[in-house]
Image: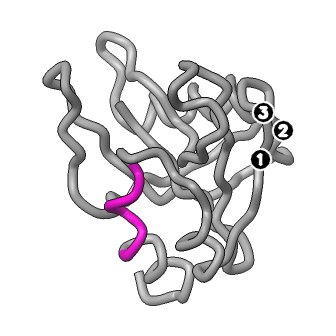
Amino acid sequence: MVAAAIIVDGRLLLAQRTRPPELAGLWELPGGKAEAGETAEDALRRELREELGIEVSGGDRIGDDVPLPDGRVLRAYRVELVSGTPVALDHAELRWVDGRELGEIDLVGNDRGWVPDLRLHLNGWG
């Protein structure tokens, strides 16, 4: 599983989930599942194209792996927006947040551990 930290002008893009019901309304870094044989970078590019209609590049790791109940891990990567304007194609809404807002927004549990690292990147220290 991969998640993307897209930071533009000191603001991080978050996506509001619509499903499953217990996570609907919570915010997350956009991303998803890697398909068989797909690298993390390829999965990020595909997922962000499908979910947001954008093209990205890069892929430096952010924070620690998050172990998931099914044995997989979730990894976050810093990516650069190459082209397109993000549109909520698979989410209820998108929001750009700064470091202060990041601490106040209702994030999915799996993403909360990355907040300190994300704040460093938002402040230009990551």
- In the picture of the structure, the residue carrying the numbered disc 1 is 94
| Residue 27 x %, y % | 60, 47
Q: What residue type is labelled 3?
A: Ala
Residue 92, disc: 3
- In the picture of the structure, the residue carrying the numbered disc 2 is 87
Give the extent of the magenta segment. Answer: 111-116
Query: Under tag 1, what secondary structure?
Result: strand
Looking at the rendering, which quadrant does residue 71 occupy?
Answer: top left
Tell me the residue at 71%/52% (across/down): 82
> Which one is earlier in the sequence, the residue at label 2 or at label 3?
2
Looking at the rendering, which quadrant does residue 86 occupy?
Answer: top right
Horizontally, residue 95 falls left or right of residue 48, namely right
Q: Quadrant of the C terminus?
A: bottom left
Tell me the residue at 38%/14% (across/down): 35
Task: Tell me how far mark 1 sits from mark 2, CA to CA.
Answer: 7 Å
Query: Under tag 3, what secondary structure?
Result: loop
Q: Which amino acid does label 2 sit on?
A: Val
Q: In which quarter of the image is the N terminus?
A: top left
Tell me the residue at 65%/52% (across/down): 14
- Near-viewer residue (37 or 102): 102
